[in-house]
Amino acid sequence: MTKDRFYLAFAVAVMMLYLTAQLRGWTFTDVDEVKEVPRTVRDNPGSYRQHYAAHYHYIGGK
Amino acid sequence: MKPPAPSAEAPQVKALRCTSCAAPIELRAPDVTERVACSYCGSVLDARDPELAILQKFDRQVRYQPLIPLGRRGQVRGETMEAIGMQRRRVTVEGVNYEWSEYLLWNPYKGFRFLAEYNGHWNYIRTTKEQPKVKADSSGECCEYLGKTFRHFQTASASTVLVVGEFNWEVRVGETAKVTDFVCPPLILSREYLSSELTWSLGEYLSPESVWEAFKLPGHPRETTGVAPTQPWAYEERYQERKQLWPLACAAVFCLHVFFMLIVNAGTTAHSQHFTVSPGDVEKTKLTDVFELKGRTCDVSVRIGTNLQNSWAYFNMALINEETNVALDFGREVSFYDGHDSDGYWSEGDRNDECFLPSVPPGRYYLLMEPEPANVSVAWDVSIERDVTMHRHLFLALIVLCIPGFWLWYRRRSFEYQRWLESDHPMEPLVKFGGGDDDD
């Protein structure tokens, strides 16, 4: 049995974290959860107001 | 240096008093002692001479209190040894003096040993039975002995500056020997040329606490300074173990990732649809048909493929659960530019984009999309896929697994840098600050 128990425990913890992230579907995308979206959005989609404000407009190209 | 055979007639010392200052002198190994130095006046006397002829005399009183009192016995490496003499030696390198103490230890059955002390570090030294093999390598000389390779550490001229007690060779204050050290921590091989005599010695690092305990010295040993040439690194074993564990851990994570990719998170397309929007459209916000995300809570991939050409579009999106009315709001920007210039064809950006939504529970959903700016004309395909394997997690896990090993590597390298700092082969520092010539 290895004497480097710290790294063994560390590696196991990293693997458990990896497993959890894959199984639970953790990602890095920035999303905002909005509750109680009105059902009328399906009939009038333009009425939905985005709560996601953390975006910027990029104008690229040469 | 072999202990000389007892002579047929032991020398008769008539007066056990210093011939120079009349201080009492005690000979602990009269059969083998050749020189004795008075601990009061420092005079070096011929122990073979019954009259204790003065060989060297000093004008000033020299008093030096050895750390191990002469005559003290101790158990070192299973051998009971008695400290009978001590010499201070000095090398001068680039104008800087480095001094250390060497204690001569004696056991009538085991012979002679040395204990060398430098900056609080100790080495237990004995002369070798065989001559080590000296070879040349890329960094100079190296030695092979006892199946180990010893690297050249330093070559210098060591002079004796002070002697106290008894010695089994014709020691003189001021005598100079050419000393070459080779190290394989915790061992050291020393080659010494003194007059016409060549001596090889093998030393082993001893902790200061073990020396104090061996000789039952009072108090605590003094703090060590720097890293000794033979000082073993306290975490060497852990470092070697970690070097073996790290690739196993990485392989395990990689296998887990492949397992996820092929079996668990194989990826299922839940819905795909095509949309277009023009500047003249009254309603630019588009909705997909309702689709179902089956199974467990997992990540969801939203992929957009556009026909943008030298333009950009920002998609305000919301994945809305039809049953719970909970929405996940997010935004993605897509841009693509290309052209020709003097260097040829160039392009920037991508017409396609993919993002991953975290932990989406199963249910019936639709995706709302509103492209900006208002005057954009764009067609796009949107594809929603669930249970997608995140490759980024694998890279992150591998990087995190490297951190403890890298930390130990850095500590080890710093330790070795300190070890070799005073040698003839100092290591390059990892990071150099400053440098460059000043312009006057």
Image: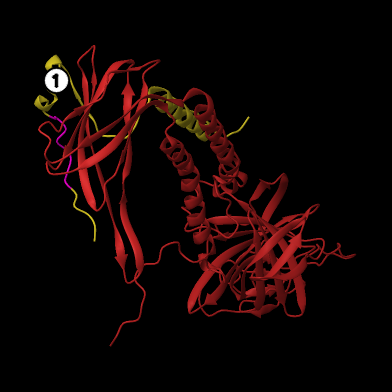
Residue A42: percent from left, percent from top: 17, 19
Q: Is residue B151 above or below residue B94?
A: above
Q: Amino acid at mark 1?
A: Val
Apparent colour of chain A: yellow
Mark yes or no: residue B219 visible. Answer: no
Nearer the observer, B254 or B234: B254
- Label 1, secondary structure: give it: helix
Residue B354: percent from left, percent from top: 33, 37
Report the chain holding disc 1: A
Q: Is residue A51 magenta?
A: yes
Give the overall secondary structure of the magenta segment: loop
Find the magenta span and give its range.
A50-57
Q: Is residue B42 above or below residue B254?
A: below
Q: Which residue is mark 1?
A: A41
Q: Which chain is red?
A: B
Say how the picture is coloured: by chain
Taking the image as shown, residue A48 lies to the left or right of residue B197, namely left
- Furthest residue in direction bottom, as rendered: B440
Taking the image as shown, residue B184 lies to the left or right of residue A5, namely right
